[in-house]
Amino acid sequence: MKISSEKRQAYGRYLIYLVLLVLLILAWEKAADNSNFRLLMSSPSLICEYFGENFPALLTATYATLYESVIGLLIAIAFSFLIMIICFYIPRLMEFVLPVMITSQVIPLITLAPLFILLFGIGYTSKIMMAALICFFPIFINFANGARLISRNIHELMYIYNASKTQMILRVYFPLSTPHIISGLKIAATLAVIGAIVAEFNGTEVGLGKNLFLSAKRLEPELMMSSLILSSFLGGSLYAMIYFLELRIGKWYLKNN
Amino acid sequence: MKIEITDLIFSYDNLSTVLNNLNLHCDNNHTIALVGASGCGKSTFLRLCCGILPNSKHQSLIGNLTINGKEPSELVKNGQVGFMFQEPALFPNLTVWENIILPLKLHKTPGASARTQELIDKVGLSEYAKFLPDQLSGGMKTRVSLARTFITKPRLLLLDEPFSSLDIKWKFLLYRELETFISEYRPMVIMVTHDITEALLLSNHIFVFGKNGSILKELRISKALPRVFQEDSLKELQGEYFEIQGLIMNN
């Protein structure tokens, strides 16, 4: 079986990444021979050992953060789509909504985490709301931008075909803004995890944010590193989820790239 | 189909006049061509003919523009207007088939698939039915646009320089296809073009627009349509060609 040159190049690239990763782990392991370094950064072997010993607790924390991130992301998607749909029906509303949205971004959103704990309590709700808030803007602004860039000819064509607003939304705004919506979702997917973890720093019963916070306080590098790895895994997984969604619904523009 | 335009003035902020005191009366089966230099208001006029006002504030429209005694937007509501843009305006996310069938699907018209098959065969794109627009050449895209325009059997066909970006070979192939469609469905055609040859070959009524948005000259071409592939067409219309060219150049 022949392998195309493009595939061969891709496999070559993956191999280089793998080799670099292995080298990094080996270097890290070697550096951990130094006790000061080990005290701060631990070592891959110690982290693996820690994973094995505390797997159920780490899994529970990961699940909690994943739950908060995913629900937060879904709420942000629903809310931004809802506002966009209302704006499509009442276009003048966008003139009011957009400046408010942009102004709201002046507030460093993560500083609202303590307020959310006060408002919604120490449970999941405050973290979900934080994740949703931080995800909302990139999805909304990218969708709005995508809709704005739809060609005038398409608008005029749909006018000629006497298309209703609902048909415009379903056949024009959503499908033709897909590349922009997906870009927004990719940014939001990683932000959702950040939002949930930052909210967890401020108080929670369980979660990766709590693990990270405690590990710094107690100087437990294995807990910190394992939580960092799991946080990265969560962010990467959510990003991959959007990427696979794009492969399904974005074939028409991915074919060109 | 009857188009009546009396003392039509269209301007922005009452300062910049795009169309100036237009008077135009045409009856059935006319193929009208609007020629003139860029920026003389031809495309604006075409859009007004289907009730699309340019997307700008502070615009004013004075005068009378009726088609069959009705407002142009009435015709649009009844699905009687077809419009071909300078760019094919295809949906990049839809296949050739989906693009052509779209107008019928929007209104859940019965027999849409059979009609789409008929049109796609006529423009010779059956093999490309599942292709996306980006996989087609410029000429093919224009053919898809042509098929989509005629799928609704429009009574008023508005053409905004749809062939301007094509090479001469594709242009003549598409002129022929357009002529065939026009003779079959017999819509009233209003066509905007920079190309005097195109206007002379496809229309029997030419309006030359001046820089200030007024009509400089109205020419009636007596030679019968269709005339795209008649050998002597252009030779016989040389006089009209130079007259139009002179009017545009001297304006």
Image (cartoon, rainbow, N blue to C red):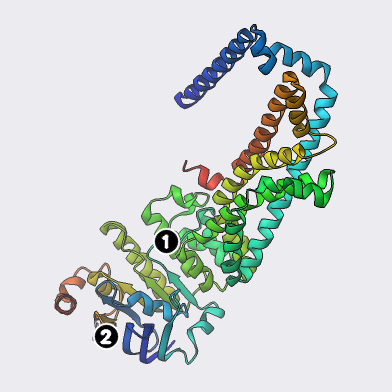
Q: Residues within 10 Å of mark 2 (few under 14, many from 20)?
A: many
Q: Would you say A58 lies left or right of B105 here? A: right
Please tell me in which quadrant of the rendered image residue B244 appears: bottom left
Give neighbour class at mark 1: few <14, some 14-19, many 20+ (Cα, 10 Å): many
Q: Are marks 2 and 1 in contact (CB under 8 Å)?
A: no
Quarter of the N terminus of chain B within the rendering: bottom left
Q: Is residue A55 above or below residue A88?
A: above
Along the viewing direction, whichever of B154 and A209 lies nearer the viewer:
A209
The disc labelled 1 sits on which kind of residue? Pro
Q: Secondary structure at mark 1?
A: loop
Where is residue A189? Give x, y as percent.
65, 42
Same chain? Circles 2 and 1: yes
Q: To which residue does mark 2 refer?
A: B215
Residue B101 higher or lower than B221, as above or below: above
Give the Cα separation between the discs numbered 2 and 1.
28 Å
- Dot 2 or dot 1: first in sequence order is 1
Q: Secondary structure at mark 2?
A: strand
Q: Amino acid at mark 2?
A: Ile
Q: Is residue B111 visible?
A: no
Residue assigned mark 1? B88
- Point out residue B59 in the picture as x, y percentages from the top left corner: 42, 82
- Residue B112 visible at all: yes
A225 left or right, relative to B173: right
